[in-house]
Every structure is written in C-alpha cells, then in structure tokens.
C-alpha cells in the first residue's frame, strides 16, 4: 500500500476530486496549507501599499491506495490539477506500512 500526498492549487480541488472519484477512489483527506517552491511567492498591492506574500495558499490531498493503483492515481491528479504554469504543485508517494479502521478493526486493504 502507498500514501499519495499531492499539493495542488486550491481552485483545482473539485476537478481533482471528480477525476479521482471516476477512478473509484472514494476517500481522501484534504487540508488547506500554505507554502512555496520555485514560485517564491509574489507581491500584492493593498490600500496603496505593496507587500510580499511569501507563502501561497495550496491544498494538500492525502490518499491511501493499493500499490497497483498508484500510477493511475498520479496520472489522474497530474491531468486534473495541471495548468501548465508554475505553481501547479507536487505529488509525493510514501510506503504505507499498516492501516487500521478504528470502528471495525479491519486492517490494511480492507481498511481503505
């Protein structure tokens, strides 16, 4: 099993969620986060004063998936979240050693 962590632009969340649902991915955790990469933030103007925004709003998705589904999930996220512009995000994949559903005690694939 793998844990897929994707950092995407906020306005792409609905597109990504719909695309993953069509793959049969039923569950994910979504968090509002802030960060920057090569984008390095930007300058904004507020009431005539210019200020630097170093951390940009992003969405973090966490998805537990079976190992054989990982490439399809990555391709789906890439297609749905991509704009072709800087700041589209990143996808990280980690090994998931164990999963337990608290309510039933089911483990691993059955718990997903």
Image (spheres, rainbow, N blue to C red):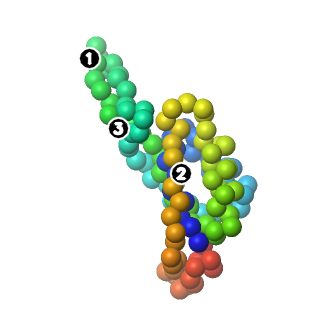
- Taking depth in this image into account, of 104 and 79 the one nearest to the observer is 79
Taking the view exactly as shown, the residue that stands out farthest to the right is 22
Across and down, in percent, residue 51 comes to 28, 23
Residue behind mark 2: 91
Mark 1–mark 3 distance (CA, rounded to whole Å): 18 Å
| Above or below for 37 versus 91 | above
Residue behind mark 1: 49
Mark 2–mark 1 distance (CA, rounded to whole Å): 36 Å
Q: Secondary structure at mark 3?
A: loop
- Give the foreground label among 2 and 1: 2
Residue behind mark 3: 55
Taking the view exactly as shown, the residue that stands out farthest to the top is 48
Q: Earlier in the sequence, mark 2 or mark 1?
A: 1
Q: Secondary structure at mark 1?
A: strand
Quarter holding residue 50: top left
For this view, does 36 lie left or right of residue 92? left
Mark 3–mark 2 distance (CA, rounded to whole Å): 18 Å
| Above or below for 89 versus 108 | above
- Residue found at x 51% / y 42%: 89
- Residue found at x 65% / y 43%: 80
Q: Which mark, by number, is residue 109?
A: none
Label 1 packing within 10 angstroms: few (<14), some (14-19), many (20+): few
- Residue found at x 71% / y 61%: 24
Q: Secondary structure at mark 2?
A: strand
């Amino acid at each position: 099993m793998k844990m897929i962590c994707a950092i995407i632009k906020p306005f792409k969340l609905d597109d990504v969620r719909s695309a993953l649902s069509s793959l049969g991915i039923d569950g994910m955790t979504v968090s509002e986060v802030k960060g920057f990469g090569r984008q390095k933030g930007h300058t904004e103007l507020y009431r005539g004063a210019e200020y630097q925004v170093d951390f940009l709003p992003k969405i973090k998705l966490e998805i537990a998936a079976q190992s054989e589904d990982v490439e399809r999930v990555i391709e789906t996220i890439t297609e749905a979240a991509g704009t072709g512009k800087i700041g589209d995000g990143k996808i990280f994949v980690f090994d998931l050693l164990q999963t337990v559903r608290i309510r039933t005690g089911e483990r691993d694939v059955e718990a997903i």
